[in-house]
Image: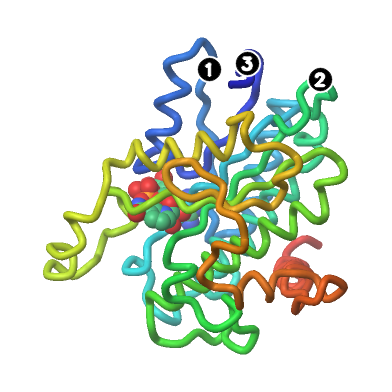
Amino acid sequence: MFSQEGKVFIVTGGNTGVGYELCKVFSYHPGKLKFLHLDLNDLESVLQAAKSFSEQESKLDVLWNNAGTGANMVDPGAKSVHGLDAMIGMHCVATLLFTELLVSQLRASIRSDNPGSTRVVWTSSYLAEGASPINGISFEHLQNRISDRTANYAASKAGTWILGREFANRHGNEGILSVIQNPGNLKAGSYAGTPALAMWLINPLLHPPEFGAYTQLYAGISPEVSLDHNGAYVIPWGRIRPDNDCPRQDIVKAMTSTEQGGLGYGKLFWEWCEEQWKPFML
Ligand SMILES: NC(=O)c1ccc[n+]([C@@H]2O[C@H](COP(=O)([O-])OP(=O)(O)OC[C@H]3O[C@@H](n4cnc5c(N)ncnc54)[C@H](OP(=O)(O)O)[C@@H]3O)[C@@H](O)[C@H]2O)c1
């Protein structure tokens, strides 16, 4: 393990579920836990959260983008405060904006004697592979979503994966490591709203939420994950999965740049997200 002394971390969604278990691990070490208000449904709140953080800290070592809402808590067609599709708005547009607003603090933590210790961890899901459309996201449906809650959630989590990979392409050369992880299937709030019969069937397959924290910890601080793994996908309970082992080769190809024979969705989706927040940044 890298020494964690003097490090500054953000865990979004740290008050419950997997995020809480992750914060609990850090609470066993000397240091201070501080609350930062962030509502990913509201881009204004994202701006304020980043501003508030930058007024308190000059560097950021690891950002865990953990906050999110499960498929059954968001009605199809639900919108964010600024009229974005709720799932894509929260898991993709707002999460990317928050991350981009913190890049200068991330840069400030890069250490030549500890390469790869500055990281952004993105939270995807097994459903990104299990239930997302062909290529992970459909540009046609980004704003006018289909009525299937699980497919909407899955597309937003495939979008998170695509953005995490693109973040590695854009910021990897500077020394910021970007890792996407599927925390595992866990007894936590993501299953809220799931019909009782489905829950009865799913429950035996779920693990305690601290297992999700193990996956997050591996992605965020394990020295096994190096700059050579930038853009890697981490699976439960902390293993890098090579792209060749991914059952959804369509998503892998979609997020690969056109120069490398892919569909260039990383660049396209990143730019689409920027277009969504542009009107609120003036
Ligand atoms: N549990 C699983 O099996 C599983 C599987 C795959 C992926 N995941 C992903 O892992 C992450 C954590 O899941 P979990 O099961 O631990 O969920 P959880 O128990 O429901 O906790 C979610 C956390 O995210 C926060 N959050 C939700 N909406 C937010 C918003 N609009 N703005 C800011 N924060 C928001 C919540 O804050 P409040 O309490 O204030 O709402 C809470 O702290 C999620 O991204 C989820 O998609 C979970």
Q: Which residue is mark 2?
A: 113
Say whether residue 103 is left or right of residue 149.
right
Q: Quadrant of residue 253?
A: bottom right
- Name the disc covering residue 264, or none: none
Figure check: 179 above or below 198:
above
154 relative position to 174: left or right: left
Residue named by callout 1:
32
Looking at the rendered structure, the kind of residue marked 3 is Ser
- In-image side of 253 versus 187 (left or right): right
Q: Is residue 80 at least partly visible in the picture?
A: no
Task: Give the labeled residue for mark 3.
Answer: 3
x then y, percent, for residue 151: 43, 78
Identified by mark 2, the residue type is Asp
Query: Colour mode?
Result: rainbow
Report crowding for label 2: few under 14, some 14 to 19, many 20 or more residues within 10 A (C-alpha): few
Disc 3 + disc 2, Cβ < 8 Å: no
Of the two numbered discs 2 and 1 on the same chain, state the one appearing first in sequence: 1
How far across and down, in percent of the image, does residue 166 sit? 74, 60
Front in this rendered view, residue 37 or 193: 193
Identify the residue at horizontal 46%, vertical 44% (top origin): 13
Distance in Å between CA atoms under marks 2 and 1: 25 Å
Q: Quadrant of the N terminus?
A: top right
The mark total stands at 3
